[in-house]
Amino acid sequence: MSAILMLICALVFNVAAFIQTKPKQEKAMTKARGTFEVKLSPQDEGADMPLARMTIDKEFQGDLVGTSKGQMLTASSSSVKNSAGYVAIEKVTGTLNGRRGSFYLQHNGVMTRGVGELRITVIPDSGTDQLAGLSGKMNIIIAEGKHSYEFEYAIGEQP
């Protein structure tokens, strides 16, 4: 009888694990593209500081029309050239493909000896108004001194 009880417990555990790990249904992603102007303003004295803070002011054009304001923290290696990192949070306010509202983006960037990695994601549940339920990630492209973006996003159910 204990073998049957163990078998039942194993089945119940496996069913519970299956229910908990069942993948979420994927949201249909939409791409937005455009350009932006950015102004970074240092908030600390001294140009050669390994740790610095800046404000961010952006104006977006294209599928996203609006502005953003944010804060950035940066750190750089004092011994290895072209190695650094930054984190930032910015609040974007405007219209995304005809939907009005605001949301927050979180940046995490690292450069290792000149090779960069950048991840910019929408902070969960930060969308307001017609952008409530927004999720996604943004990619920044810098070519010939001009800034552009590709924003892959979805607007799901509101909490």
Image (tube, rainbow, N blue to C red):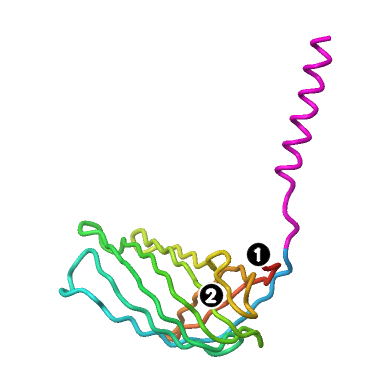
Real-space CA distance between mark 2 and mark 1, rounded to the nearest whole angstrom: 15 Å
Report whether 47 appears left or right of 39.
left
Residue at screen point 36% across, 85% down: 39
The residue indicated by pointer 2 is 103
Q: Secondary structure at mark 2?
A: strand
**Vertical relation: 77 (above or below) 70:** above
Looking at the rendered structure, the kind of residue marked 1 is Pro
The picture places residue 155, in percent across and down from the top left corner, at 68, 72
Which residues lie in the magenta part? 1-26
Residue at screen point 43% across, 88% down: 37
Disc assigned to residue 43: none
The picture places residue 62, in percent across and down from the top left corner, at 58, 89
Report whether 39 appears left or right of 9.
left
Looking at the rendered structure, the kind of residue marked 2 is Phe
Residue at screen point 54% across, 72% down: 138
Foreground tag (2 vs 1): 1
| Quadrant where the C terminus is found in the figure | bottom right
Q: Secondary structure at mark 1?
A: loop
The residue indicated by pointer 1 is 159
Circle 2/circle 1 CB separation < 8 Å? no
* Dot 1 alpha-carbon crowd within 10 angstroms: few under 14, some 14 to 19, many 20 or more: few
